[in-house]
Image (cartoon, grey):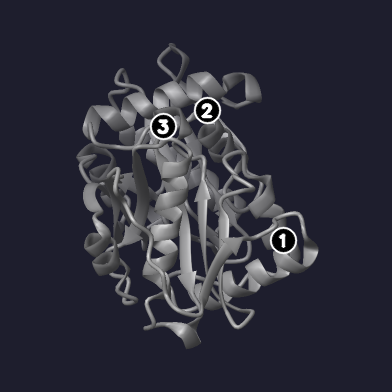
Amino acid sequence: MITSVREATAADTTAVAALINAHEFAVDPAASMMSHDGTADFMNGYADESPTYLLEIDEVSPFAAVVNLHPDALKKRFYTDVYVSANVKNVDEIIGWTIAKARDEHPDWAMWPGANVLDTELTDGWAKFGFTLLRRYFTMRMPIPTDFASTQIVGLVIEPFDAADPDQQRDWHRIHQDSFQNHFGFQARPFDSWIKLALAENTFDPNGIFRASVDGRTVGFCQCTDEFIEERRGYISALGVSQDDVGHGYGEALLRHGIAYCASRGFDSVELGVDTANESGALRLYEKVGFAAESSWIQMSNDGWAKAPPA
C-alpha cells in the first residue's frame, strides 16, 4: 500500500529519470530514453506548473512510483503520466490515487493519461477505472545518411528564427498557431503564455527553430530540440505549414532542413513523434523521407471518475 507521498525537487531529477527509463525499457526496448533535461521539463509540468509526486509503497525506497498530473488550465485537461518501479505489485492502487488527486483538484476536467502501447499492466489498470483508447502515436526514427540532401524549392527561403527577437517571437507564435489549428486536441494559446512556455523548456535549442518564407511571408516552421542529446540523437519537436500554403512541398523542405541541422550537430539519427490519425498526411511524409515507426504510445480518456476511490 502507499505509505508516503512527497513532491519531487530538483535533487530528485536523476533518480526520477532512472525510474522512468527503467519502467519504459522494461516494457519496450525501443522506447526513447528520458534525458536529464527532459526529466526536468517533465517534473516542472508541460503546460502549467505542476508538481511531480513521488510515492513510496510498502517501504520500497527512495520511492516506487512517479506521478505527474500535467494539468493544462486552458484546455481544462490533465495529460497524466504514471511510472512505477519493478517492485510495485499493485499498479491499480497508484492509478486510483492519481485519479483521486486529479478529481480533488479539478473534478470537472477531462483526464487523458498516456502509456506505451506495450505496457499492458498500465493500460489495463486505466481501463479498470473506465478509461478507453483515445489516440495512438508513433515514435519514428531514421538514420541520417552521409549523403543526405535537403530540398530546394524556387522562391522558398529557410533561415533560423531569432528566438530573442520580440517580432520574430510573435511571427513564430502566429505560424505555430495557424499550422496546428486543425490538429486533434489543439487549442489556441495567447502569445504571452505560449512564448513563456516555449523559452522555459530545459531542452530548448535557440538555434534550432527555422522559418520558411516566400516573398518575405512566413509560410511554415520547423523546431529541433535537445530532447535526446544524451543519446546523440536529433529531435524534431514541431513542424508546421500555414493552412493557406499546404500542398507546395514546404513541409518536406522544412523537414529535410531540420534533419540536415541535426546532422550538422554530429547526430547520426533523428526522431519525431506523429499522431497516426493526423489527417494532414504527416505520417506519409515522414515515411517518404525515411522515418520508420520504432515505438508506439497511446492516450486514453476517461468516462469513469466515479470509479475512483476517495482521496
Sequence-first tag of 2 and 1? 2
In the picture as drawn, the residue positioned furthest to the right comes out as: 166
Q: Nearer the viewer, residue 193 or 175?
A: 175
Determine which of the numbered discs, if any, sits on residue 155 in the image. Answer: none
Q: CA distance from mark 3 to mark 2?
A: 13 Å
Q: Which residue is mark 1?
A: 193
- Residue at image x 41%, y 82%? 246
| Number of dots carrying numbers | 3
Q: Is residue 302 visible?
A: yes
Q: Residue 275: x percent and y percent?
A: 33, 63
Q: Which amino acid lies under the numbered mark 3 shown in the image of this protein?
A: Arg
Q: Which residue is mark 3?
A: 232
- Residue at image x 32%, y 50%? 129
Q: Residue 139: x percent and y percent?
A: 30, 49
59 to 20, vertically: above or below: above
Q: Residues within 10 Å of mark 3 (few under 14, many from 20)?
A: some
Q: Which amino acid lies under the numbered mark 2 shown in the image of this protein?
A: His
Left or right position of 210 against 275: right
Q: Residue 161: x percent and y percent?
A: 64, 60
Q: Residues within 10 Å of mark 2 (few under 14, many from 20)?
A: many
Tag in front: 2 or 1: 2
Q: Which residue is mark 2?
A: 36
- Which SS class for mark 3? loop
- Residue at image x 37%, y 51%? 272
Q: CA distance from mark 3 to mark 1?
A: 31 Å
Q: Is residue 111 visible?
A: no
Q: Are marks 3 and 1 in contact (CB under 8 Å)?
A: no
- Which SS class for mark 1? helix
13 to 277, vertically: above or below: above
Left or right position of 70 against 89: right
